[in-house]
């Protein structure tokens, strides 16, 4: 299958080039030329399939023309070595808990899948010393770093905003060593993302280093996130709760909800989506006005959503042929302040015993406010609450048990390299490597 750029100014490429390059030459994001509809038989029987079996069928629709079946199946099954439960929270609202990978965040799946697929292509091409650049507002960095840890021939550079990620998020990518280097940028996530995009466009830098991205910019990172939506539908179908399904996605860079929109285009019967924002409400404002007006991001307690210019907005526009009317027909929005997020975490914990993280709280609140009586709502709980330990404990007034996976990171020493947010300084550093 060929992949085209959202900017439509560069040639279409094969999957291999889209994965290895990450960003198109015209600065656009790659999109598959077609989205294959999955069979009626698949939808009729998916409730009887395992997560791995469902994911492989979806992956085959995305990548089956380009990756041998045995290799693709091995990548999928290696990636999904854990369960993703759907948990009933209250009334007709369910949580899809996506924090059962090595870093306890939903991006573990995309990070590990991309690491395995990129490694396959590197070996196929006989390439060495591929440099992965990834900007993170929190969980992407840890998921990508742990997914690529120890992968031969790949060096990973994680760019993160100084002082704007939680301690445990920072520990998960600054303590690994080996082929993982953490770059602590004196700026915001948007500054980190701008540095990554500028690096891809710099001729001199690309002549010296082979660069690619592991953000949701890369098709191999964001497309596997569609697996979750099919799995959630299958579990709710098994429970007789899949009719009139509404999915609410806490949204920052919009890779996750875009993967869900792809799933809907492939025939998954989701009625509609809600994009839940924190105070960084650029997409919410677009839904209201039809005008896209990116702004500098502001820091919130839901830090992984602190994005002022979400990259994947370009994919959403492309998916709906730049039609604001078509977008608002299938996606609504919500935006919440830190105080509202705190209020929701405390209220839900007190009433149900279910502990939300700040991002999941945005998703739950949007469903509670906007779900119709006949609808069933699923919100994506994207990371374990213990990853935001001080924030969550302060809200509920209780200690939160720290899973063993996270405790191991706390015991390690942070190692990072300070980087200024201007591109010339970043380029000088990278050219010296």
Image (spheres, helix red, strand yellow):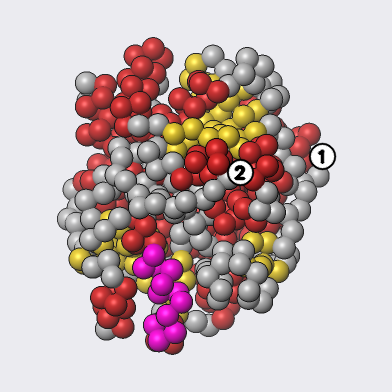
Q: x, y (%) of residue 100?
A: 44, 40
Image quadrant in which the C terminus is located: bottom left
Q: Which mark is residue 41?
A: 1
Disc 2 secondary structure class: helix
Q: x, y (%) of residue 418?
A: 20, 66
Badge 2 density bin: few <14, some 14–19, many ≥20, Cα 10 Å: many
Q: Which mark is residue 426?
A: none
Range of magenta residues: 194-205
Identify which residue, 99 or 278, lies in the foreground.
Answer: 278
Q: Quadrant of residue 153?
A: bottom left
Disc 1 secondary structure class: helix
Q: x, y (%) of residue 354?
A: 40, 21
Identify which residue, 395 or 50, lies in the foreground.
Answer: 395
Q: Is residue 23 above or below residue 283?
A: below
Q: Is residue 375 above or below residue 28?
A: above
Magenta span includes 196: yes
Q: Main secondary structure of the magenta part?
A: helix
Outermost residue toward the right?
40
Identify which residue, 343 or 181, lies in the foreground.
Answer: 343
Badge 1 density bin: few <14, some 14–19, many ≥20, Cα 10 Å: few
What residue did someone put label 2 on?
A: 260
Q: x, y (%) of residue 411?
A: 18, 48
Residue 26 in view here: yes
Q: Looking at the image, which residue is at 46% across and 66% down?
A: 213
Residue 257 in view here: no
Disc 1 versus disc 2: nearer the observer: 2
Q: Is residue 37 above or below residue 429?
A: above
Number of marks in picture? 2
Q: Looking at the image, which residue is at 49% across and 27% down?
A: 366
């Amino acid at each position: 299958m060929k992949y085209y750029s959202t900017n439509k100014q560069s040639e279409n490429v094969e999957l291999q080039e889209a994965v290895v390059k990450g960003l198109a030459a015209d600065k656009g994001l790659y999109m598959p030329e077609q989205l294959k509809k999955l069979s009626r038989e698949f939808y009729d029987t998916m409730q009887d399939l395992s997560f791995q079996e469902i994911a492989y069928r979806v992956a085959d629709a995305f990548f089956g023309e380009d990756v041998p079946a045995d290799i693709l199946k091995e990548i999928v099954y290696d990636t999904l070595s854990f369960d993703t439960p759907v948990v009933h929270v209250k009334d007709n609202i369910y949580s899809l808990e996506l924090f059962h990978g090595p870093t306890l965040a939903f991006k573990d799946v995309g990070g590990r899948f991309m690491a395995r697929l990129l490694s396959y292509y590197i070996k196929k091409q006989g390439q060495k010393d591929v440099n992965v650049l990834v900007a993170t507002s929190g969980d992407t960095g840890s998921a990508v770093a742990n997914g690529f840890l120890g992968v031969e021939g790949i060096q990973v550079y994680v760019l993160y905003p100084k002082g704007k990620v939680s301690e445990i998020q920072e520990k998960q990518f600054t303590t690994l060593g080996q082929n993982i280097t953490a770059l602590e940028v004196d700026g915001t996530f948007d500054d980190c993302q701008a540095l990554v995009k500028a690096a891809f466009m710099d001729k001199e830098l690309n002549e010296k280093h082979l660069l690619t991205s592991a953000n949701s910019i890369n098709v191999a990172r964001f497309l596997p996130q569609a697996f979750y939506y099919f799995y959630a539908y299958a579990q709710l179908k098994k429970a007789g709760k899949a009719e009139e399904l509404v999915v609410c996605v806490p949204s920052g860079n919009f890779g996750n909800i875009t993967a869900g929109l792809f799933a809907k285009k492939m025939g998954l019967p989701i009625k509609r989506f809600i994009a839940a924002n924190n105070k960084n409400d650029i997409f919410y404002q677009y839904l209201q006005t039809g005008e896209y007006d990116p702004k500098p991001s502001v820091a919130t307690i839901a830090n992984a959503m602190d994005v002022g210019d979400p990259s994947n907005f370009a994919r959403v526009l492309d998916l709906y042929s730049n039609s604001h009317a078509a977008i608002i027909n299938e996606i609504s929005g919500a935006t919440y302040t830190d105080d509202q997020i705190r209020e929701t975490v405390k209220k839900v914990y007190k009433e149900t015993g279910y502990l939300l993280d700040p991002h999941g709280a945005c998703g739950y609140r949007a469903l509670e406010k906007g779900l119709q009586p006949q609808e069933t709502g699923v919100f994506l709980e994207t990371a374990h609450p213990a990853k935001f330990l001080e924030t969550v404990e302060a809200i509920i007034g209780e200690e939160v048990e720290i899973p063993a996976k996270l405790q191991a990171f706390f015991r390690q020493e942070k190692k990072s390299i300070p980087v200024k947010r201007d591109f010339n300084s970043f380029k000088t550093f990278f050219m010296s490597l």
